[in-house]
């Protein structure tokens, strides 16, 4: 029995399902989740000290690789001064200024402790600002686990087959209108019918919780146009894509300005941080400036701010994203080539340093239905064959993958060699 198997059995006695977040439990691929004891650069080390090239990166934050010295040093320096004050600190303003500078649509920003808090608060703010209750989201998009957003949700909810969770009152869910991603006509039809009741649209500008699906040309433009016409708030959930697909997020790639943006993952450098921000006029509605209530005992925590700020400074370096995209492209081209050689129907998607892998004959995957039509069984086998060889992919066919700055020639080659063997056994 491996240490991970022992630890998982033990964990299940005191933690529901043995994990503190569902996808970690490997329900999507079967088998025992790997328990890790440490990480360095592009690698994770399990409890038996086996090394894995990591393509999860803590589900996104580790864009510099694990234990990057500038982030670690910033944290260590801050720790000496105290862990939490529950009172304002200068570093919070420095963080806010940095975020506003990097993402021009954000004129003001509020820090929270997770992506879930960011989206939940952004929705409340949009409702408070417009005086309307209805919200629009897209099937297969995941925006955290707040009640209103666990309707046809992606990520773990999709992996576990519970996109509509028990425990969400019907009276809450009825205000969430769900439409197919990348379907502009469906959004137009809904707004024609009830646009004046819609507080906001929340969307992943690149969907990363039903594998990885970029927006089709015109889709985000349509959302912007309809929100303008009907005075609804457009929220880009960039918890995953922010500082990942480009320094200024997906909004800079597709050139659409949302009213509000939610952030998480990278912004905390590996510490529990989320944020939401946008137009000053809307943000000014937040307490104590305005009447929409939102708060947090540990929000803007100085240690978390130190990690996040060091992270944002490091990724602002000239050429950072070009290099990361080139590494990601090298990985995906290599995988496609090896799959083709083995005669396995396979395609990939890349947006910056975020990618999707699809076992399918379809030349391009652009919708939720097409994701569901991919060969999930084959993905599971591929996942385990890669894991055995020391490559740690997301344990679900509905998650995106991430490359870090620490992934170099050696790690890509190791991954491609493993994939060649895996494809041959599929
Ligand atoms: N929004 C998106 C787009 C996400 O990908 C996630 C998490 N994967 C969340 C919100 C929720 O963030 P958290 O898990 O930090 O609550």
Image (tube, rainbow, N blue to C red):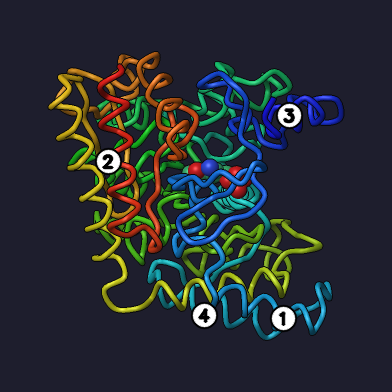
Element assignment for label 3? helix
Could you tell me which residue is drawn at 14 percent across and 35 percent down? 337
* Residue at the disc numbered 1: 78
* Residue at the disc numbered 3: 8
The answer to whether the residue bearing label 1 lies less than 8 angstroms from the nearest atom of ligand 1 is no
* Nearest to N terminus: mark 1 or mark 4: 1
Q: Is residue 137 visible?
A: no
Image x and y of residue 245, in percent = 33, 55
The span from disc 2 to disc 1 (Cα, nearest Å) is 40 Å
Nearer to us: label 4 or label 2: 2
The quarter of the picture where residue 164 lies is: top right
Element assignment for label 1? helix
Image x and y of residue 304, in percent = 67, 68
* Residue at the disc numbered 4: 97
Q: Is residue 111 visible?
A: yes
Nearer to us: label 1 or label 3: 3
* Residue at the disc numbered 2: 416
Element assignment for label 4? helix
* Nearest to N terminus: mark 3 or mark 2: 3
The span from disc 4 to disc 2 (Cα, nearest Å) is 41 Å
Could you tell me which residue is drawn at 44 percent across and 60 percent down? 63
Q: Badge 3: how crowded within 10 Å, few (<14), some, or many (20+)?
A: many
Q: As drawn, is 156 to the left or to the right of 386?
A: right
The quarter of the picture where residue 305 lies is: bottom right
For residue 86, above or below residue 57 = below
Image x and y of residue 425, in percent = 30, 18
- Tag 1–tag 3 contact (CB < 8 Å): no
* Nearest to N terminus: mark 4 or mark 2: 4
The span from disc 1 to disc 3 (Cα, nearest Å) is 34 Å
């Amino acid at each position: 029995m491996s240490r991970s198997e022992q630890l998982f059995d033990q964990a299940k006695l005191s933690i529901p399902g043995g994990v503190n977040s569902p996808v970690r439990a490997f329900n999507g691929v079967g088998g025992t989740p790997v328990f890790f004891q440490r990480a360095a650069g592009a690698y994770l080390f399990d409890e038996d000290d086996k090394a894995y090239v990591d393509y999860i990166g803590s589900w996104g934050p580790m864009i510099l690789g694990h234990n990057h010295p500038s982030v670690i040093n910033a944290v260590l320096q801050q720790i000496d001064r105290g862990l939490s004050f529950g009172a304002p600190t200068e570093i919070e303003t420095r963080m806010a200024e940095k975020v506003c500078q990097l993402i021009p649509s954000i004129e003001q920003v509020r820090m929270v402790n997770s992506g879930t808090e960011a989206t939940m608060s952004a929705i409340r703010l949009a409702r408070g600002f417009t005086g309307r209750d209805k919200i629009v989201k897209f099937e297969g998009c995941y925006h955290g686990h707040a009640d209103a957003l666990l309707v046809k949700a992606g990520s773990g909810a999709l992996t576990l087959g519970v996109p509509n969770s028990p425990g969400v009152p019907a009276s809450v869910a009825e205000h969430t209108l769900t439409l197919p991603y990348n379907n502009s006509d469906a959004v137009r039809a809904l707004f024609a019918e009830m646009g004046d009741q819609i507080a906001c649209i929340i969307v992943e500008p690149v969907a990363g919780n039903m594998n990885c699906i970029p927006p089709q040309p015109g889709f985000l433009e349509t959302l912007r146009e309809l929100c303008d016409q009907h005075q609804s708030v457009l929220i880009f959930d960039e918890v995953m894509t922010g500082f990942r697909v480009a320094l200024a997020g997906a909004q800079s790639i597709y050139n659409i300005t949302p009213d509000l943006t939610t952030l998480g993952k990278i912004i905390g450098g590996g510490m529990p941080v989320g944020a939401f921000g946008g137009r000053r006029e809307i943000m000014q509605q937040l307490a104590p400036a305005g009447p929409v209530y939102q708060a947090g005992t540990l929000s803007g925590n100085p240690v978390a701010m130190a990690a996040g700020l060091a992270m944002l400074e490091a990724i602002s370096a000239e050429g950072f994203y070009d290099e990361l995209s080139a590494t990601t492209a090298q990985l995906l081209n290599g995988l496609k080539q090896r799959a083709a050689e083995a005669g396995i129907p396979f395609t990939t998607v890349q947006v910056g340093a975020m990618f999707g892998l699809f076992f399918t004959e379809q030349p391009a995957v652009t919708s939720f239905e097409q994701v569901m039509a991919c060969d999930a069984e084959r993905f599971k086998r591929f996942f385990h064959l890669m894991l055995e060889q020391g490559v740690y992919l997301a344990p679900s066919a509905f998650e995106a993958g991430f490359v870090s700055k620490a992934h170099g020639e050696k790690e890509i080659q190791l991954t491609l060699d493993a994939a060649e063997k895996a494809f041959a056994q599929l």
